[in-house]
């Protein structure tokens, strides 16, 4: 009877016979009734939710001193988040001059330049226009950049890769707004400018603006968080984080790029021959095993689900492969639905570590047929002058005592 029950439960979970021992162990642990709980009245309802006091997951901060570990960025704890949506409170932050406090009652978006009819929109006016909600990741072009020149063996997934997050964004297509203004046919670029103290700005090709760009005011079902651009940000699906201008106040329609500081001295990619790649907006396919990962310890012979995320700025993830033998063989991971374009995609792979030291890694392929390369291949082409746009394979080294460390230079 017991055997039959565990067999059917194994079938229900969709697991092979290999994991039966672990499941039977689970069942025997929970066989005795739980201890009696006190029946005191619980907490009252509250106007705005907060998490359990037992949960401590946080962005990349010193947890004891609450001091940020980096001056102008914080990182998503990818190893401690589930599914594909990043909680708004854990979305990574990156800004150049602090988070401005903007009142949505007075903040406006101005559209001017090469248009027939310059317009100023209030936040309320934008909210009355036909809206769209879309799930997309935003990744900083500097994410994983420290690995170009070696990284640290102690680094963990949050420190290395925590500058990517995924949300449901709600707003208005930029094409709707530009059509309202009557764009001059000569116009080819649009300068997007924020209302932060340093007026962060980027020139964006008109094609992207008319294709899928949005002015968003919603994030995960509520207004944007201040750190994400409250009350308005530009969303450019699949393009590097800094071009998704936060605290958006102005779109200037032009017939050439503005050549602003952020696209000349910053956010360009210096190549080995001394030339610089400019306007490298699109993010290429990338994946990482997030759990277990650097800092975790494996137990030999125990069931272990490898899980992580994959994403691409160019379409949809079509496959993720896993190696647990340092690249000798690769096997397909299961992709968890929904698999959405330009969104984090969750993958899972059942595994049992045999107790020998090894290297584990993931690599993904997107709907254009592009496969995530080893970091060494990227360095061969782009050299070591720039740290931007590292989408190379992340290797995790497993030592014979089960300890996992960053294996990118192992
Ligand atoms: Co770039």
Image (cartoon, rainbow, N blue to C red):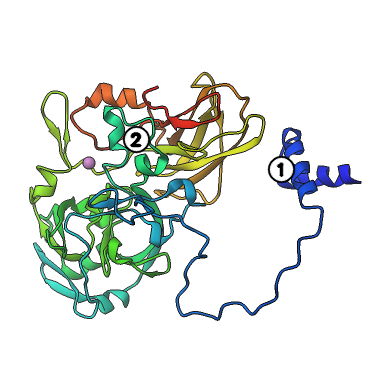
Q: Within 10 Å of the Cα at label 2, are there few (<14), some (14-19), or many (20+) other Cα atoms?
A: many
- Determine the CA span between mark 1 and mark 2: 32 Å
- Who's the residue at 61% across and 37% down the image? 304
Q: Which mark is residue 115?
A: none
Nearer the N terminus, badge 1 or badge 2?
A: 1
Using the image, determine if residue 173 lies above or below residue 14: below
Determine the residue positioned at 44% across, 47% down. Answer: 78
Give the quadrant of ligand 1: top left
Q: Looking at the image, is 256 positioned above or below residue 323?
A: below
The quadrant of the image that shows the C terminus is: top left
Q: Is residue 88 visible?
A: yes
The image's mark for residue 14 is 1
Q: Position of residue 397 (x, y in %)?
A: 47, 27
Under circle 2, the secondary element is loop
* Left or right of 382 in this view: 166: right
Looking at the picture, how far across and down is residue 74, in whole percent? 31, 52
Q: Tag on residue 391?
A: 2
Counting other residues with Cα less than 10 Å from the Cα at mark 1, is it few (<14), some (14-19), or many (20 or more)? few
Q: x%, y% of residue 242?
A: 23, 51
- Residue positioned most to the front: 64
- The correct choice, above or below, for 56 with respect to 368 in the image is below
Q: Secondary structure at mark 1?
A: loop
């Amino acid at each position: 009877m017991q055997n039959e029950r565990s067999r059917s439960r194994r079938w229900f979970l969709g697991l092979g016979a290999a994991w039966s021992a672990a499941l039977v162990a689970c069942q025997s642990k929970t066989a005795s009734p739980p201890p009696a709980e006190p029946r005191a009245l619980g907490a009252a309802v509250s106007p705005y939710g907060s998490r359990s006091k037992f949960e401590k997951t946080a962005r990349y901060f010193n947890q004891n001193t609450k001091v940020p570990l980096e001056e102008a960025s914080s990182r998503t704890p990818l190893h401690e988040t589930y599914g594909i949506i990043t909680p708004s409170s854990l979305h990574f932050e990156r800004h150049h001059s602090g988070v401005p406090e903007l009142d949505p009652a007075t903040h406006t978006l101005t559209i001017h330049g090469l248009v027939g009819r310059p317009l100023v929109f209030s936040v309320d006016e934008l909210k009355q226009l036909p809206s769209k909600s879309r799930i997309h990741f935003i990744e900083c072009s500097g994410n994983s950049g420290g690995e170009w020149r070696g990284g640290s063996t102690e680094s963990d997934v949050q420190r290395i890769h925590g500058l990517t997050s995924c949300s449901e964004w709600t707003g208005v297509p930029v094409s709707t707004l530009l059509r309202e203004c009557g764009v001059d046919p000569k116009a080819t670029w649009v300068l997007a400018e924020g209302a932060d103290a340093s007026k962060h700005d980027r020139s964006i090709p008109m094609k992207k603006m008319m294709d899928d760009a949005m002015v968003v005011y919603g994030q995960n079902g509520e207004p944007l968080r201040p750190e994400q651009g409250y009350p308005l940000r530009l969303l450019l699906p699949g393009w590097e984080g800094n071009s998704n201008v936060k605290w958006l106040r102005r779109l200037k329609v032009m017939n050439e790029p503005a050549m602003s500081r952020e696209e000349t001295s910053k956010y360009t990619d210096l190549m080995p021959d001394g030339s610089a790649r400019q306007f490298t907006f699109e993010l290429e396919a990338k994946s990482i095993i997030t759990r277990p990962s650097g800092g975790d310890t494996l137990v030999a012979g125990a069931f272990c689900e490898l899980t992580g995320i994959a994403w691409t700025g160019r379409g949809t993830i079509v496959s993720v492969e896993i190696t647990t033998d340092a690249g000798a063989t690769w096997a397909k991971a299961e992709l968890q639905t929904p698999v959405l374009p330009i969104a984090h995609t969750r993958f899972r792979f059942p595994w049992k570590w045999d107790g020998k030291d090894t290297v584990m890694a993931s690599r993904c392929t997107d709907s254009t047929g592009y496969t995530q390369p080893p970091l060494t291949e990227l360095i061969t082409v782009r050299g070591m002058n720039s740290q931007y746009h590292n989408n190379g394979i992340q290797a995790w080294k497993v030592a014979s005592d089960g300890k996992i460390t960053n294996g990118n230079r192992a």
